[in-house]
């Protein structure tokens, strides 16, 4: 219950951390409310995977500081670069310029795995360390057992996910093609931001 | 086209005496605003000269705008002057106060950076959600730090009175790309060569910076994307990160404000990048003024589409009789339409209503906005120039 309440209390922050990747992606996809719901569920599934890894880490170490200190920048950097890459791929997948055989091949490969893109994005978004996550990490670490830690993060995940409920309704605007173009451009800008921030973090924590 | 049609189309001005009469309240208001600068302390004759000259200049340009029907031409002069004047006064102020255009991290975090309306889209979400203003700046030198409510009220007032007209009347940066977009007679890159999808980029920049600013609690556009940092202030290159940011500012200024406007004869920064303009497009909905095309007069010559500096007209506009939501009400199409088919219009009134009345009712608040936000900079810049001529330095 503590994890759920913590998630509920901090869910807006979690949503804010995930929204820059999720909203432009959904706008670009231009799907119906139902299809968006599936996408968001996949995203949340991936995010839950990321959270469970944190639950595992919290149990394994039992302490926030000793586990994250020294690797925090590296972990966030990798997550940022990965998120940027997945977001860029998700946008390029649909409307890549034709004409290049190599590119066509790559696109065909990507198109075979579109269902995994939201999951991957969710997973990488889940790995981003934000203030509520650190709070949850501390709470989970204090449970002292693997099951307790995983359940804590699961409850935290459920609490934060409440705020994702309105997102599928973006599908109401799916017929507005302008929104898809805006979503595509915004996804590229956001992914460039994460790419730059990730590279800077990996390069030595300049940011 | 017959000469009579052309003459009719061009004669959208009014009698001089009427224009002067209309001008009087605005002239009085502006004189009070500017004379306020003379109150208290010793009066420098150079300040008096600068204030009177700018007041006269703006007044004459407004009268010309009303009487000649060449709204775009005279607005453009005032708009460009305002944009050039801002750094002419602001950079010497920075040199006097900080010894450089560059701000140290300490000064930045202590609210030394000047507040700018372009931060507005990024500030709103954190202010609503967490009750904090994420820009640690001051609005004007000497004003209370963090007094963003003053700028907020100004912005709301401007949005209500002119809507997206802000971008051609109120913005003290837009004159830069307007200047460069007007330098060449003909574009090297024609408008039809530019993919129309780029028009959506400002909305994408807006969406991205609002979302990213909400999670980082910092004004992302100011930190990474603002071309106008190149002509105002920026963080000192004290780290690799700051060097990267400064390089981006310089490249964006050169690309979006200088080179592309020169090549296309379009306001690329305003039309294809600025997120503040995109936000103003939405606020335009609550503004009563708009530009309309009389489809009965329109001959589909498409001159307006070719001439629009902000990509706000396309074929769909000529079918619907309305420009796109990005229209900045700059008056270029109103002035250039050979048939006089395009005019300012007040929402809710008949299309055939007196267009001169609509024009005057729009120009009045638009001019006051321009004067309020820009004329002070022009007077101050003129004062700096007079100082340079008489003392050899622009600094106190």
Image (cartoon, coloured by chain):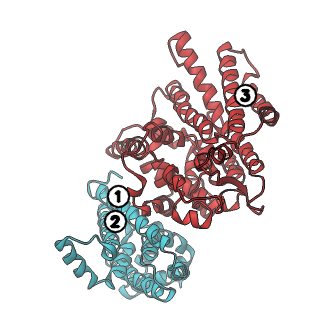
Residue at the extreme left of the image, as rendered: A102
- Please state which of residues A47 and A185 is positioned toward the viewer in this rendering: A185
The residue lying furthest to the top in this view is: B390
Can you tell which quarter of the image residue A188 is in? bottom left
SS category of the residue bearing label 1: helix
Q: Secondary structure at mark 3?
A: helix
Residue B286: x %, y % from top left:
70, 61
- Chain A painted colour: cyan
Query: Percent x, y for residue B376?
Result: 65, 31
Q: Which residue is mark 3?
A: B34
Q: Residue B353, how many percent across, how many down?
A: 78, 57
Colour of chain B, in one word, is red
**x, y (%) of residue A109?**
22, 81
- From what the image shows, is residue A145 above or below residue B87? below
- The answer to which quarter of the image holds residue B38 is top right
Using the rendered image of the protein, determine whether residue B104 is visible from the camera's viewpoint: no
Of B176 and B234, nearer the camera is B176
Q: Secondary structure at mark 2?
A: helix
Q: Which residue is mark 2?
A: A80
Report the number of numbered marks. Answer: 3
Q: Which mark is residue A197?
A: 1
Residue nearer the viewer, A121 or B167: B167
What's the distance in space between the residues labelled 1 and 2, CA to CA? Answer: 7 Å
């Amino acid at each position: 219950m503590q994890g759920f309440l913590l998630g509920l209390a901090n869910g807006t922050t979690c949503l804010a951390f995930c929204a820059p990747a999720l909203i432009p992606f959904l706008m670009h996809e231009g799907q119906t409310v139902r299809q968006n719901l599936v996408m968001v569920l996949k995203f949340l599934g991936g995010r839950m995977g990321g959270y469970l890894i944190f639950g595992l880490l919290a149990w394994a170490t039992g302490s926030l500081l000793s586990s994250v200190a020294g690797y925090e920048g590296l972990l966030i950097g990798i997550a940022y670069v990965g998120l940027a890459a997945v977001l860029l791929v998700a946008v390029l997948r649909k409307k890549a310029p034709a004409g290049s055989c190599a590119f066509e091949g790559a696109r065909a490969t990507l198109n075979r795995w579109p269902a995994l893109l939201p999951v991957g994005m969710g997973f990488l978004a889940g790995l981003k360390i934000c203030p509520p996550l650190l709070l949850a990490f501390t709470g989970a670490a204090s449970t002292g057992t693997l099951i307790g830690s995983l359940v804590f993060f699961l409850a935290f995940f459920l609490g934060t996910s409440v705020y994702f409920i309105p997102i599928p309704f973006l599908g109401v605007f799916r017929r507005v093609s302008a929104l898809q173009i805006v979503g595509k451009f915004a996804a590229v800008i956001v992914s460039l931001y994460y790419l730059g921030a990730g590279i800077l973090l990996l390069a030595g924590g300049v940011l | 086209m017959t000469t009579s049609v052309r003459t009719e189309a061009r004669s959208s001005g009014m009698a001089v005496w009427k224009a002067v009469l209309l001008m009087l309240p605005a002239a009085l208001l502006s004189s009070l605003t500017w004379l306020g600068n003379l109150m208290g302390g010793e009066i420098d004759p150079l300040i008096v000269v600068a204030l009177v000259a700018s007041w006269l200049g703006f007044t004459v340009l407004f009268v010309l705008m009303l009487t000649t029907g060449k709204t775009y031409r005279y607005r453009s002069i005032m708009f460009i002057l305002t944009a050039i004047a801002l750094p002419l006064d602001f950079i010497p102020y920075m040199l006097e106060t900080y010894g450089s255009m560059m701000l140290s991290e300490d000064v930045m975090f202590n609210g030394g950076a000047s507040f700018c309306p372009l931060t507005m889209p990024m500030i709103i979400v954190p202010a609503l959600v967490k009750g904090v203003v994420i820009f640690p700046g001051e609005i004007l030198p000497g004003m209370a730090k963090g007094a963003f409510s003053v700028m907020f009220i100004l912005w709301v007032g401007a949005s209500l009175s002119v809507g997206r007209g802000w971008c051609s009347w109120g913005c003290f940066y837009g004159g830069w790309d307007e200047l460069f977009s007007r330098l060449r007679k003909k574009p090297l890159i024609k408008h039809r060569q530019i993919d129309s999808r780029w028009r959506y980029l400002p909305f994408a920049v807006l969406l991205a910076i609002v979302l990213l600013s909400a999670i980082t609690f910092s004004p992302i556009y100011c930190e990474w994307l603002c071309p106008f940092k190149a002509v105002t202030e920026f963080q000192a290159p004290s780290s690799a990160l700051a060097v990267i940011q400064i390089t981006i500012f310089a490249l964006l200024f050169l690309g979006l404000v200088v080179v592309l406007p020169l090549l296309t004869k379009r306001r690329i920064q305003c039309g294809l990048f600025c997120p503040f303009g995109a936000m103003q497009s939405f606020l335009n909905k609550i503004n009563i003024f708009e530009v309309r095309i009389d489809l009965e007069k329109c001959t589909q010559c498409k001159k307006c589409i070719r001439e629009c500096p902000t990509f706000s007209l396309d074929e769909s506009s000529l079918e619907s009789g309305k420009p796109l939501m990005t229209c900045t009400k700059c008056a270029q199409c109103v002035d250039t339409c050979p048939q006089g088919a395009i005019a300012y219009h007040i929402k809710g009134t008949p299309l055939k209503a007196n267009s001169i009345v609509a024009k005057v009712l729009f120009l009045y608040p638009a001019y006051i906005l321009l004067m309020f936000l820009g004329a002070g900079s022009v007077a101050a810049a003129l004062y700096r120039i007079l100082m340079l001529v008489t003392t050899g330095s622009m600094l106190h």
